[in-house]
């Protein structure tokens, strides 16, 4: 059966990303720098996006949503709208996705042994994790748990004494902030990155078994909203 999946990602403070797949193949994506206008534009964007492919929300088998970490407001918008959409379509199952893992999944072909996404969290912290790059058709393998890290916590977790030579590629949606997060020079190559609907929806296809009822979807903030 060729499952149809719509992915919604509002976890970034700037970018809104939509993806659509059928049978594991990307039909299309939409990546827009909407800033804080996500809540105003998201319903009409999703409607337009689906109509581009002559689909209705009832034609979908799954809805995927990036439920964090990232922008508190954006996550709330994305999760709430995904739940509404799933209910309106007859309680379609929802696939929760990590913003950190999706960012890594959208960066194939790294020569480094690990990839570390960095999302600015405020309050002197970053949202981060560590992954081994994914082989074709596989999801990234987690090597360090996702959470909000301070500078010292991140450096200790990334480079324990026995792994000082670990090769790491760093990805960030806010390079101007995260580049100065490390004491001294950045311990590896550093690239800017932004959410991509195609990466989100393909990753969702690998996690169909994680689909849950819409009312069970929760935001993953990793910190209290009054920090930062």
Image (cartoon, helix red, strand yellow):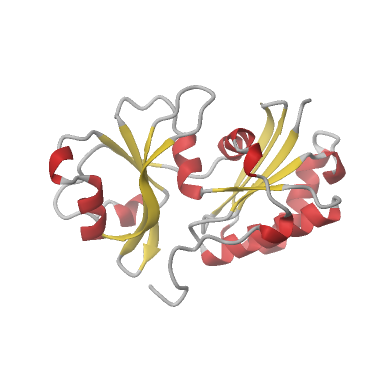
Residue 213 place in picture, x, y as percent:
73, 53
The residue at the point 50 percent across, 49 percent down is 99
The answer to whether 90 is drawn above or below residue 220 in the figure is above
Residue 118 horizontal side relative to residue 203, left or right: left
The residue at the point 76 percent across, 56 percent down is 43
Q: Give the quarter of the figure containing the C terminus.
A: bottom left
Camera-side residue of 92 and 79:
92
Image quadrant where residue 49 sits: top right
Residue 27 horizontal side relative to residue 181, left or right: right
The total number of labels drawn is 0
Q: Give the quarter of the figure containing the N terminus.
A: top right
Residue 208 place in picture, x, y as percent:
66, 38
Is residue 119 in view from this perspective? Answer: no
User: Given the current orientation, which residue lies at the most extreme top position?
Assistant: 136
The residue at the point 83 percent across, 45 percent down is 57
Residue 211 place in picture, x, y as percent:
67, 45
Camera-side residue of 57 and 194:
57
The residue at the point 67 percent across, 27 percent down is 24
The answer to whether 50 is drawn above or below residue 39 in the figure is above
The answer to whether 89 is drawn above or below residue 80 in the figure is above
Residue 221 horizontal side relative to residue 129, left or right: right
Is residue 173 in view from this perspective? Answer: yes
Residue 145 horizontal side relative to residue 165, left or right: right
Residue 157 place in picture, x, y as percent:
25, 50
């Amino acid at each position: 059966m060729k499952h149809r999946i719509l992915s919604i990602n509002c976890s970034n403070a700037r970018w809104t990303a939509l993806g659509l797949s059928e049978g594991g193949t990307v039909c299309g994506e939409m990546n827009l720098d909407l800033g804080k206008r996500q809540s105003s534009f998201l319903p009409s964007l999703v409607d337009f996006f689906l109509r581009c492919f002559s689909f209705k929300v009832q034609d979908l088998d799954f809805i995927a949503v990036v439920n964090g970490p990232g922008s508190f407001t954006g996550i709330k918008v994305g999760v709430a709208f995904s739940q509404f959409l799933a209910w309106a379509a007859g309680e379609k199952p929802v696939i929760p996705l990590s913003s950190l893992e999706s960012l890594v999944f959208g960066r194939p072909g790294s020569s480094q042994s690990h990839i570390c996404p960095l999302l600015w969290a405020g309050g002197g912290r970053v949202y981060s994790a560590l992954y081994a790059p994914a082989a074709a058709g596989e999801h990234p393998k987690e090597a360090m748990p996702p959470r909000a890290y301070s500078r010292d916590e991140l450096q200790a977790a990334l480079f324990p004494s026995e792994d000082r030579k670990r090769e790491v590629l760093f990805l960030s949606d806010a390079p101007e902030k995260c580049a100065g997060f490390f004491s001294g020079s950045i311990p590896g190559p550093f690239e800017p990155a932004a959410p991509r609907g195609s990466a989100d929806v393909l990753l969702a296809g690998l996690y169909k078994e994680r689909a849950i009822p819409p009312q069970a979807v929760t935001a993953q903030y990793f910190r209290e909203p009054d920090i930062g």
